[in-house]
Image (cartoon, rainbow, N blue to C red):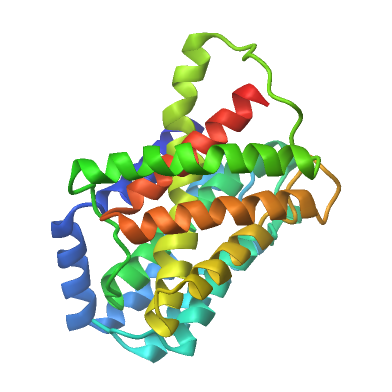
Amino acid sequence: MRTLVLALLLGAVLSFFSTAVQTRIGGLLRRRPAWLGTLPFVLTAIFCGAAALAGACSLPLSAVILVYTAAPVLCMAGAGPGPVQQPSLRDFAAILLLWLPVEFNVGARLVPAGAQGYLHSVAYGIAILLGLVLFLCFRGFPGMKYNLPRSRRDGWLALVGFAASAPVLIVAGIAVGFIPWPHLPVRGAGTMAAAVPLIFFATALPEEILFRSLIQNLLMLRFGAGWRTLAAASLVFGAAHLDNGPQPQPNWRYMIVATIAGLAYGRVFQKSSSVASSAALHMMVDWTKHFFF
């Protein structure tokens, strides 16, 4: 049942690849901005249903989720509906309100240990859905590139990006002690093949939506698409890995490697027509690290 819940959330996120879905929801929210106020209650109800299936639903947890979903909505409602060309401080604040509570597992103490991983994934899915509704539909920012690839070039960009960045990441990762020397994979071909869509949909695409479609794109709209902006967005991406293992935290080794990877992901995002291109590169890097290091 937990897998079904996560699959339904993923399906909802992927449905926004449809221009018709974006147009319909965006048009509705811009004609009737007050409807945006129902979104926190709908998303909180979804989370509470998922928590109930895990035997983890409680009034304090429900209150935390309602506050979490309401905060960015209130922030964006004050900015007003789009389409807009340049982000305001409210837009950047809304991103922080979406990202940081999930990053720091706010409310984790209210969840039984056995349900924490599952409900963290549910919360991440809700955060991505909320971000897409707010930034893609309500505010209507250009350049998010949340659409299916539009040419073969998007695929080639991911492959070229991998060929260019993988050697650098390997050398840097070994040099700082983040990864060991490479080894042959110990998992079977079936497991390795099954990991491709899992890594893409569970890790690569959600992170690319947040760090490229939202953070990097808004920085580019505000400050231009030069190398300084790319470096700043990559540094943010790297810093987001300070609280990740396997090394002791703050994990400076991971931050250094992730910042370098962020430069590659961000450059592919700039050159491609779809966030799926940088997500494909992201997936290839994570997949290689998982099975060969």
- Quadrant in the rendering for residue 113: top right
Q: Which residue is found at the position 39% from the left and 53% from the top? A: 268
- Front residue of 230 and 94: 230
Vertically, is 135 above or below 211?
Answer: below
Q: Residue furthest top?
A: 188
Q: Which residue is found at the position 38% from the left and 69% from the top? A: 39
Please indicate whether residue 278 sits to the left or right of residue 118 in the image: left
Please indicate whether residue 93 sits to the left or right of residue 279 in the image: right
Vertically, is 137 above or below 113?
Answer: below
Vertically, is 245 above or below 238?
Answer: above
Q: Residue furthest right?
A: 248
Quadrant (top left, top right, bottom left, bottom right) of the C terminus: top right
- Front residue of 34 and 128: 128
- Front residue of 289 and 82: 289
Q: Which residue is found at the position 30% from the left and 75% from the top? A: 141
- Quadrant in the rendering for residue 196: top left
- Quadrant in the rendering for residue 226: bottom left
Q: Give the mark count.
A: 0
Q: Is residue 279 visible?
A: yes
Residue 292 drawn at (x, y percent): 63, 23
Residue 66 drawn at (x, y percent): 53, 68
Q: Which residue is found at the position 36% from the left and 61% from the top? A: 270
Residue 86 drawn at (x, y percent): 35, 86
Q: Is residue 6 visible?
A: no
Residue 164 drawn at (x, y percent): 48, 42
